[in-house]
Every structure is written in structure tokens, then in C-alpha cells.
Amino acid sequence: MCLLLTVAGWLTFFGAQAQVVPPVTTPPVTQPPPDSLSQDTTKTQEFLKTLKDISQRKTLMGRAVKALVVFKPRKVEGPVENARLPQTYDQHNYKVVRSIYFKRLDAFGYSINDTLAVPDNYLERLGNGLHMRTKQSMLRNQILFQEGDMLEPLDLSESERLLRQTAYILDARVLVNDSTSTEDSVDVVIITKDVFSISASGSASTSSTRLSLRDINFMGLGHQIRTSYRFGLSEPQPWQFQGRYFIENISRSFISAELLYNNTYYYKQQSISFRRDFFATNTKYAGGASASWYQTLQPDYYQVEDPEPGAPIPHTPLDYYVQDFWLGRAFRLKSYDLAQDNPGRFITAARVMNVRYTQGGGPTLQSARLYLTAFGYSFRRYYKDQYLFGFGRTEDIPAGNLLAITAGFEDGSVKNRPYLGLKGAFGKYRSNFGYLYGGLEYGSYRYKGGWEQGVLTTEALYFTPLYRLRNWRWRHFLWSRSSLGLRRPDLFALDIDQEDGIRGFSSQEVRGYRRFVLNYETNFFTPLTLLGFRLAVVGFADAAWLTSVKDRSPFREKPYTGFGMGLRFRNEYFTFNTIQILLGYYPRLPQLGNHQDFKLFQTTRQYYDFNDLRFTQPLISEFR
């Protein structure tokens, strides 16, 4: 049975008060909205009064209710109805930062917008006592300015976003104290709210037992430790281990380091890496260096000349190591508004990757040294909204454009060939329309006068505005993806399992060469809570077209489909992922043999995510 509980979860989990996370900063109002969550119906108030009467009794039931339910009302603000650009404080551009005041809030009982909110009971205080608050030095590392610096445009809004996108900060505000600021200097106030950083999970069955531990803010330093150990497995390897140690933003350089070690029967990995991304719109330099060693048992699509669809694919050993280095430079474009920085950037980057196979290989796998260079344009802005992937916390929505051209040369042990890749993407947000993202990517090698081993991928994501019905909120999501192999020998490299196609679907028999996937989801965010966890009702409908015939359209095949609904739980104050319990219906599963058309499954991964429109290292288009 899966336990998605924190280490001290049994103590703090039941004491965490279910409250709506305050929305992004809005102008103060004298009264809450007429349909805010603070307005309960008469029946609800009568029910709460009954619970309060029970909690005052000196019985076991009374003490349990008193520990689980907090009756003290708190200020609750309604959600943001329209996404907005972050406040820019244009009037303070190029002033000297005189002082920075940090207000750090623990995970339980505090509100980033309500300074009067404090922990209400012993369990909330105990949970905060077990949690080590983020060090002030780590918060200083994440912001783009220090005392004595000249305040550049976007420094405040970008610093707030960088704080919020860390794993250990739930929400953040970066504000200017206008009452103490002068014509040439400013005082900045930074408010942050932590999440409870320690968590554990486990599962047990007749075949194996799994234990996982993680701390995403070790000693309040922002370091992440993740481990997973599985034992009691049958031969050939009775145990499995996965470990990761991640150090974010070393000494305010925005360089992160990561150590990885995975050891399973089918997959072994050891790697060390350093990287610095284009983390903010005004970042000038980015780069990375890594070294990795792999041992895998991979499906070999080339041993059988004409494999039957659904036939098992043999596995062969594949051992190799990879050395990877890249460096990028962003150039600021001219701005015709002296009060605003132009967020558009022209970017160049170069990459060298050395891949050596010590065992195994194939027509698309060869030891080689790859030289890549890329040129691109990136324009990014971020809007703030709620109820996208979270349950009320502030979320940053990327909007803008990205265009990149990648060219390179592969110096291989079998053949030498040039490479060309193109990528374009855009993201648009309108308050009365919603969000729309579209992306297209193409990459292929040139060999003997023709193009080979090519891939064409497309992606589109749309979500509606946030609709309201009294205390309920809901959105609709629509996501499409396609992956088309072009002159490739690996005709069975694609599948439609889980996040690659149909959620809850799993079959080694369904593989192909060209794929198109369409996913629909609706989320109803309820005002209900269960022991501090917010509750949402989820409905989904997925369809996937897949062909294993070379150069054939996937739409000529009958689609695989999945339909379902279920519940989603999340407590924003904990680090472990959202808990989802879904029931799916798969009409074509019985045709594959030994499958049922209904399936109850649990998942902790959110199905959708934003493409950040961020220029990354020069890449080879993936076929997966």
C-alpha cells in the first residue's frame, strides 16, 4: 500500500489547517468577494457548530476533533480572475538598493498575504519545529540584486519568480517599501513561505518492498537529497537503488551541481554535472559540463528484419559513456522605452559531445564526437495566475516566442554526416481566452545525398480561463502531440504508454513508427478539504493513433482510446506530489489479450506542464 506521507507526516499531516493559499497581490479591498470561500451556507455553519460542541467534550472523540479541525476563522481572499503581468515598479528603476528585509514564514499556519495568521494548535507548531526554515543566505542567492546595487528593470519581478520556482518555496513576494524609499534609493521587502521539505513513501507487495526518502531543503540550504531502495526482488538482481544529490545555485553563481547513481538490473547510471541555464530574461551567459556512464539492456529493433506487430522485442546489452560541454551567450536587444528593458534576446551557443560505446550499438547508434552550434531568438514574459497545476498557490505562466536553428557535424566511427535542426514555439495568454502554446521541431542527418534518421514533432497546449460557480472553480485542458519518424530503421521505437500517450495505459505490444496523441482533461476544484488536503474532481479522454508501417500516416490506423475520472488531492504545504486516484476505461485493451477494459490506478505526476520558451543547449531532436 502506497504511503505518500512525510517523515513526521503522521504528526503534522493531521494538524495542517486547510486554507486557501492567498492569491497574487491585488489592491486592498474592504470586504471579501460575495462568493468567497469564507461565506458558508447555513447547513455548513450548523455542522461546524456541532463539531465545535463535540471538540469541547473531554472524550476521545472530542480530543480527536479538536486536533483535526481548526475553528478559528481566517482571512481568505478569492482567486485571481485574470492573469496579470507582475508589478514592475518602473518608478524605482536605476535607484540604489539601500536595504533588503527578509520575512521568512514556516510551512504551517502562516499566510504570505495575511500577517495576522499564526499557527493555531500544537500540531502546526510541532510541524514547524521539525522543519528547518530556508537560510537567509539561500534567499539572497536567488535574487538578482544586493545592497548597494543599482536596481535594473525586471530585477524585482524576476527575483520573485526565481524564488517561487524553487522546490522549497511555496510562494514569494518582492516588494518596495514606498514609505521609506527616496528619489535615489529604495528599501526592498522580501516575504517567502516554505514548504515542509522532508517526505517519505513506500510500498509493499508479495514480490518486493520499496522505501523512498527525500529532503528538498536539507538543513535549510536548498540542497536536495532523494533516495529510493527496493528489495525482496527475484533474481537476477534482488535489489535496486536510486540516489540523487542536487546543489542549487552555488555561491550565487546560479551554477547548479548534481550527482546521480542508479542501479537496477535493466539500467545502471553514474553521472556528475554542472549547469547554468538562462534562468532569467536578462541572463548573459549559460553553459554546462557533465560526464555520465551507462549500462543498459535496451530493446533491439534491428535483430528481426520484419517483426510482427505486437511481437516481443529482444533486449541486448548496451554500455557507453558520454562527455558533454556547452556554452551560450545572450545579447540584449535595443529597447525604445527607457523605463523598460526589452525582454527579447538574440542567443548563440556551441556544444561538444563525445559518445563512446564499449558494448552494443546499431544503425542509429555509433561512437562519435558531435559538434553543434545554435542561433536563436527568445522573448519571454510571465503572467501570474492560480488553479492551473496547484490548488490556489501563485503560478507563473510563460508567454512569448522562441526560434532556434541548430547545425552541426557528427564525426562517427561508422560514418560522418552533418546535422540540421529547427525549432519554433510560441505562448500566448488572454484573460478572456486562456492560454495557447504551439511548438514545432525538426531534425535530421545528411548522408550520401539524402536525409536520414529524421524526426518531426509538434505540440499544442490550450487551457481555458478559470470558470467559477459559487465556491467551485474549473478549467479545461486540451493537449496534442505528434512524433513522425522520417527515414528511420527503428520502426518500433514509439509507444503510447502513460505520459507518452494514454494515461493508465500500459502495453509492450503496442509500438510504432509514427504517433499522434490527443488528450482532454477537465478539473473541478472544490471548496472541500480532507485532513488539510484540497480536493479536485478530474475527468479525462485520451486518444492515440500509432502506425508501425514505414512512411504511413498514423490516422490510417484505428485509434487507441482511454476515458476516465477520479479524484485529485494536494496539500500545498508538503513536498510530495499530488495524489490522484483514477478509474479508466480502455475499449481496445481486451483485443490485445490478457487485459481488462477497466483499470483503477494511482499516479503522482501531473500530466501537463508548461514549455518555458527558454533557449537551452543545442539539441538533437529526440525520437521517443
Image (cartoon, grey):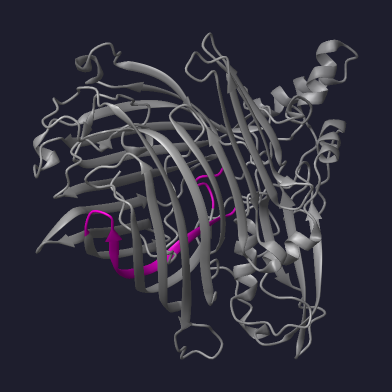
Q: Tell me where residue 320 appears, x and y as whole percent.
A: 41, 45
Residue 187 in view in this figure: yes
**Residue drawn where x is 79% and y is 20% of the image:** 65
**Residue drawn where x is 26% and y is 33% of the image:** 300
Residue situated in front as seen by the camera: 212 or 80: 212
Q: Tell me where residue 63 appears, x and y as whole percent.
A: 85, 18
Is residue 400 one of those drawn in magenta?
yes
In the displayed structure, does residue 17 sit left or right of residue 291?
A: right
Residue situated in front as seen by the camera: 569 or 237: 237
Q: Tell me where residue 390 appears, x and y as whole percent.
A: 55, 44
Is residue 207 one of those drawn in magenta?
no
**Residue drawn where x is 28% and y is 22% of the image:** 586
Give the farthest residue toward the top: 206
In the displayed structure, does residue 449 sit left or right of residue 218?
A: left
Above or below, 377 against 524 in this view is: below
Residue situated in front as seen by the camera: 203 or 244: 244
Q: Tell me where residue 237 appears, x and y as whole percent.
A: 51, 20
Q: What secondary structure do most residues of the magenta stretch adopt?
A: strand
In the displayed structure, does residue 476 sit left or right of residue 137?
A: left
Count the numbered circles shown: 0
Give the farthest residue toward the right: 58
Which quadrant would the C terminus be assigned to in this image? top left
Which quadrant would the N terminus be assigned to in this image? top right
Above or below, 389 against 350 in this view is: above
**Which stretch did the figure color magenta?**
386-415
Residue 34 in view in this figure: no
**Residue drawn where x is 79% and y is 27% of the image:** 11
- Location of residue 432 (image quadrant): bottom left
Above or below, 396 against 124 in this view is: below
